Image: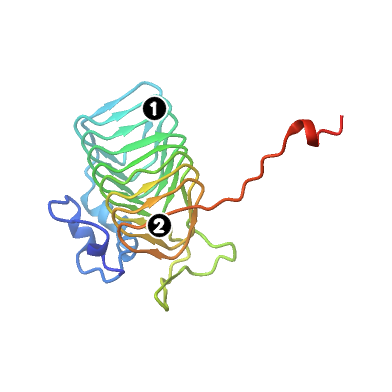
Amino acid sequence: MFNPTDYFDLAGCEYADLFAGVRYVWQALERLEEYIDERLVPEILGRVAPGAFVSDRVWLGPGAVVEPGAVIKGPAIIGAGTVVRHGAYIRESCLIGRDCVVGHATEIKRSVMLDGSQAPHFNYVGDSILGRRTNLGAGTRCANMKNDHSTVVVRASGRAVDTGLSKLGAVLGDDVQTGCNVVTSPGTLVGPGCRVYAGAVLRGVYPPRTLVKVRQILEAVSLAESDPT
């Protein structure tokens, strides 16, 4: 339920050793900064457009593109073929795999995006892990801090595990799809293959291949009848 292999197929994953020996999947984030520092040899092998800012603590893989107006603060490792679109902001300690998309007005901080994952439009990904081929709908946000600033507790099947972390976003398994304007509460775990309807607010743990629906009550009133004029 909480092991990295419950969420990700790590066979052939370039960064599988980040998860080696990890009991709880979120513990990979605790070692992320050190992991990047040990492996980072800054180099730009992709294309950085004029008007983009890329710090001197970034490795950008072959075929990767950074569009005008994007900011990569670093330290960051960004894989081959990844596109960082106009207006994206990649902050500290980000590990981004191959063929990913970090889109317009998307902010990534202290997070992992495995190969093929996409945060393409107006997303916030803080202290989170996105599995392979995960796609965030426009406006999906991974909240990473509780209002009372207490440590994040993960709850599932009658268990409550205190992570000891004041900041923990979401873990989304391989092939998760979210609709527009989904919000994941701090410490949300979503199993591989899940689909989430637009506008949902998630918390807790969701088993693999779960469809999460939002049920709304809508009322349509005739303007002619309701308009006092």
Q: Position of residue 221 (x, y in %)?
A: 71, 39
Identify which amino acid the numbered label 1 is placed on. Answer: Ala
Task: List x then y, in percent, for residue 135.
Answer: 34, 43
Dot 1 falls on a residue whose secondary structure is: loop
Q: Which residue is mark 1?
A: 52
Answer above or below: position of 63 versus 132: above
Q: Nearer the viewer, residue 72 or 137?
A: 137
Say which quadrant the C terminus sits in.
Answer: top right
Residue 85 at what x, y percent from top left? Answer: 38, 30
Which numbered dot is residue 21? none
Q: In the shown orientation, is residue 210 left or right of residue 79?
A: right
Are circles 2 and 1 on residues that touch, CB within 8 Å? no
Give left or right: position of 175 versus 68: left
Question: Where is mark 2, residue-wise?
Answer: 170
Q: How is the image coloured?
A: rainbow
Mark 2 Cα shell of 10 Å, populated few (<14), some (14-19), many (≥20) = many
